[in-house]
């Protein structure tokens, strides 16, 4: 009846419409490794030993020294594999420490649907797992990371945590490893090898430099002057597109002297990195420097459309943004990646972004560009809301997921700068909080916005309804029912049938899940829908049909339930909508099971699981596995049923509320177990169940 999406929307293939171990299964979520990794053999050997012997290791060092790359190389090898995966959490886009736990939980595949504190749920989820967790770029969240790491390590004896940060966490059990610059002495140094690699990538003609011992010595001196800091070497190497190595050696000292900031004392390596970035900044064209400054408002990665909307203006017209951005990418100021289904994405490294942000303040544009950023992503949220119920649903899900960090940043800014816009944006993202696995985060944003924003009727009603949906998923049914009633009164005052239908669904869901299908039918059934009126293809009408079909199943009126579900499925198919259509398939399977047609039930639930695998809907997958187990148990295959129940158990653990606390959902699951045990016996059932429970859910 309800559902959510995981960030990983590519589930492994399966013979039964079920995610199972096999080809394509990937434990963990490691980012792609950069091609220019050079050297670091002693550090890798040390980390290989420490990751087997210690439980909390922190890599420290100046910005740009290569902490993240070293961490990625250290954990990517087969020697660091863990039974429950190696999980990477990029914290550089995160600004609010209160969202740290939610960020980690989502990264490891925990889409918790309980009202309990999320840190407690994450500790419980990790308690019996053996995994390696990498928290990358923690220096701006040291206190929060220290607390969370301590809680997790105390609760999960099989957990190892690797931290990258410019400063240590200062925990008693922490092993601190300082990441130093690359060796830069001699003609075969690692620093020179990295400089050569970047130079050749930028300008193949630079090969002549490294074929000449005298010119190679000049390049080695450049590397030494840059202290062997990898990011500085890459920025310098990219300049060989325009300069000779002799020109670089001549000008580097001049630039360093001019750009060294004597007003702010820094350790030598910090000063080198700062002046190297300043040198790269001085060598950019004026429009490149302007774009660099404006891009600093982005947290995480972004696309070209966002860059145009946020950064154009004055001497930089929108039509020139892409060309200027390409120039920054060629200079290694901006990183460019290609992602399947998302196209080109761009990103500033933290050290480069911080420098750009200082220049944005110098230009006096911080407020202007930050406002543009926030309102661009607010507009994107509203467009996604309008497109959610159509054929672009999967694309909108992927796009909004890709923009998660930017959405957070925008909401945080609007909560202070424009609370009304924050309220509207948080309410427009109802599908993301409700259907895409961000229940805790959504509830927190909605409660904050509702508390501080002026009470504008339409925006208030939408945000209140969205909050009620998160409460339903968390099992906070009394509050959800109360808010449903409040939404209904408010919608009647607005004379808006769509909002009346949405409120009816919320109220119906709040009474249906605890076990009152009669009241749910009164609230959202055909007569109630007709009384409200409204579009029969709108979200409110369709959600009410979903609630009605499930209520009829709960009352044993399976024929009527199937008729309602078929009608719902047809409308969803015409709209090109997938999320609700899969739940219509689920109801058809429940109805078929209730009528004793186990084969028909299995067919429908496999169709449902196919849709849920496509969308990565963890709750939907868990529901479907329970139902498929009951169907195949009825067909006499007790071993497969037991395995499915075990796999379902693993998926329910990622949701946090087995069977959503619903008596009818529990009854379906128990029916499958009873029949499976009767067919194969307790010992065989337990063995098959354990095998299914070992299936990956990431």
Image (cartoon, rainbow, N blue to C red):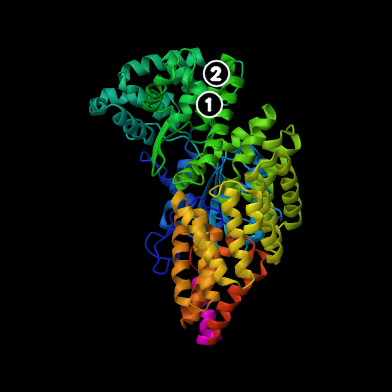
Q: Is residue 84 visible?
A: no
* Residue named by callout 2: 359
Q: Position of residue 592 (x, y in %)?
A: 51, 73
Q: Is residue 422 above or below residue 130?
A: above
Report the disc number at residue 588: none
Q: Position of residue 221 (x, y in %)?
A: 37, 24
> Which quadrant holds residue 18?
bottom left
670 inside magenta stretch = no
At a point 64% along the width and 71% down the height, the residue shown is 555
> Which quadrant holds residue 185?
top left
Label 2 Cα crowd, 10 Å radius (few <14 / some 14-19 / many 20+): many
Q: CA distance from mark 1 to mark 2?
A: 9 Å
Q: Secondary structure at mark 2?
A: helix
* Residue named by callout 1: 296
Q: Nearer the viewer, residue 569 or 59?
A: 569
Label 1 Cα crowd, 10 Å radius (few <14 / some 14-19 / many 20+): many
Tag nearer the camera, 1 or 2: 1
How many marks the image carries: the answer is 2
Query: If the image is split into quadrants, where does the N terminus sit?
Result: bottom right
At a point 44% along the width and 61% down the height, the residue shown is 610
Q: Is residue 581 shown left or right of residue 515?
A: left
Of the numbered discs 1 and 2, the one sitting upstream in the chain is 1
Q: Is residue 493 above or below residue 676?
A: above
At a point 52% along the width and 75% down the height, the residue shown is 593
Residue contact at pointers 1 and 2, CB within 8 angstroms: yes
Main secondary structure found in the magenta portion: helix
Q: Position of residue 687 (x, y in %)?
A: 51, 79
683 inside magenta stretch = yes
Q: Nearer the viewer, residue 511 or 470?
A: 511
Stretch in magenta: 679-694
């Amino acid at each position: 009846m309800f559902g959510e999406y995981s960030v990983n929307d590519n589930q492994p293939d399966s013979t039964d419409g079920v995610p199972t171990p096999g080809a394509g299964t990937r434990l963990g979520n490691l980012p792609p490794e950069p091609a220019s990794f050079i050297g670091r053999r002693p550090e890798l050997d040390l980390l290989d030993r420490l990751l087997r012997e210690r439980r909390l290791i922190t890599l420290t060092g100046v910005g740009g020294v290569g902490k993240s790359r070293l961490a990625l190389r250290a954990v990517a090898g087969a020697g660091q594999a863990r039974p429950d995966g190696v999980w990477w959490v990029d914290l550089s886009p995160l600004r609010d420490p209160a969202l740290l736990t939610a960020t980690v939980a989502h990264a490891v595949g925990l889409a918790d649907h309980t009202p309990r504190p999320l840190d407690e749920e994450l500790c419980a989820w990790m308690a019996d797992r053996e995994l390696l967790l990498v928290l990358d770029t923690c220096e701006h969240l040291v206190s929060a990371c220290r607390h969370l790491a301590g809680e997790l390590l105390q609760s999960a004896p099989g957990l190892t945590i690797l931290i990258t940060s410019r400063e240590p966490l200062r925990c008693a059990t922490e092993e601190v490893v300082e990441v130093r610059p690359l060796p830069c002495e001699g003609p075969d140094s690692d620093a020179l090898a990295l400089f050569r690699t970047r130079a050749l990538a930028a300008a193949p003609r630079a090969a002549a430099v490294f074929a000449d011992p005298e010119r190679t010595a000049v390049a080695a001196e450049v590397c030494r002057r840059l202290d062997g800091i990898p990011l500085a070497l890459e920025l310098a190497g990219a300049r060989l597109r325009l300069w000779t190595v002799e020109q670089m050696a001549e000008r580097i000292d001049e630039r360093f002297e001019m750009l060294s900031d004597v007003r702010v004392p820094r350790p030598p390596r910090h000063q080198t990195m700062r002046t190297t970035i300043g040198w790269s900044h001085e060598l950019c064209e004026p429009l490149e420097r302007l774009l660099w400054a404006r891009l600093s408002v982005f947290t995480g990665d972004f696309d070209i459309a966002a860059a145009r909307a946020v950064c154009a203006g004055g001497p930089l017209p929108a039509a020139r943004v892409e060309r200027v951005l390409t120039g920054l990418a060629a200079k290694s100021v901006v990183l460019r990646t290609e992602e399947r289904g998302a196209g080109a994405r761009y990103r500033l490294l933290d050290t480069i972004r911080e420098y750009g942000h200082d220049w944005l303040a110098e230009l006096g544009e911080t407020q202007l560009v930050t406002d543009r950023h926030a309102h661009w992503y607010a507009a994107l949220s509203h467009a996604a809301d309008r497109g959610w119920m159509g054929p672009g649903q999967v694309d909108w899900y992927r796009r909004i997921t890709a923009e998660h960090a930017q959405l957070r940043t925008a909401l945080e800014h609007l909560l202070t700068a424009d609370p009304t816009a924050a309220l509207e944006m948080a309410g427009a993202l109802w599908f993301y909080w409700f259907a895409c696995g961000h229940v805790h985060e959504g509830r927190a944003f909605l409660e904050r916005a509702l508390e501080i924003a002026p009470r504008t009727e339409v925006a208030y009603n939408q945000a209140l309804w969205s909050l009620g949906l998160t409460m339903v998923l968390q099992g906070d049914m009394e509050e959800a029912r109360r808010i449903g009633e409040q939404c209904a009164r408010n919608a009647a005052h607005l004379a808006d049938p769509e909002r009346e239908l949405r409120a009816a669904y919320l109220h119906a869901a709040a009474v249906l899940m605890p076990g009152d299908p009669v009241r749910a039918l009164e609230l959202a059934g055909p007569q109630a829908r007709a009384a409200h009126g409204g579009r029969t293809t709108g979200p409110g009408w369709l959600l009410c049909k979903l609630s009605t079909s499930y209520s009829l199943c709960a009352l044993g009126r399976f024929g009527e339930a199937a008729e309602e579900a078929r009608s719902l499925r047809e409308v969803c198919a015409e709209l090109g909508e997938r999320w609700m259509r899969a739940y219509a398939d689920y109801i058809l399977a429940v109805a078929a099971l209730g009528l004793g047609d186990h084969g028909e039930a299995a067919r429908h639930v496999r169709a449902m699981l196919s849709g849920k695998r496509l969308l990565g809907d963890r709750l939907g997958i868990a529901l479907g596995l329970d139902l498929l187990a009951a169907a195949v148990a009825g067909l006499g295959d007790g071993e497969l049923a037991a395995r499915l129940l075990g796999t379902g158990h693993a998926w329910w653990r990622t949701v946090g509320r087995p069977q959503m606390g619903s008596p009818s959902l529990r009854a379906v699951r128990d029916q499958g177990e009873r029949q499976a045990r009767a067919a194969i016996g307790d010992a065989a059932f337990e063995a098959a169940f354990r095998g299914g429970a070992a299936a990956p859910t990431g």
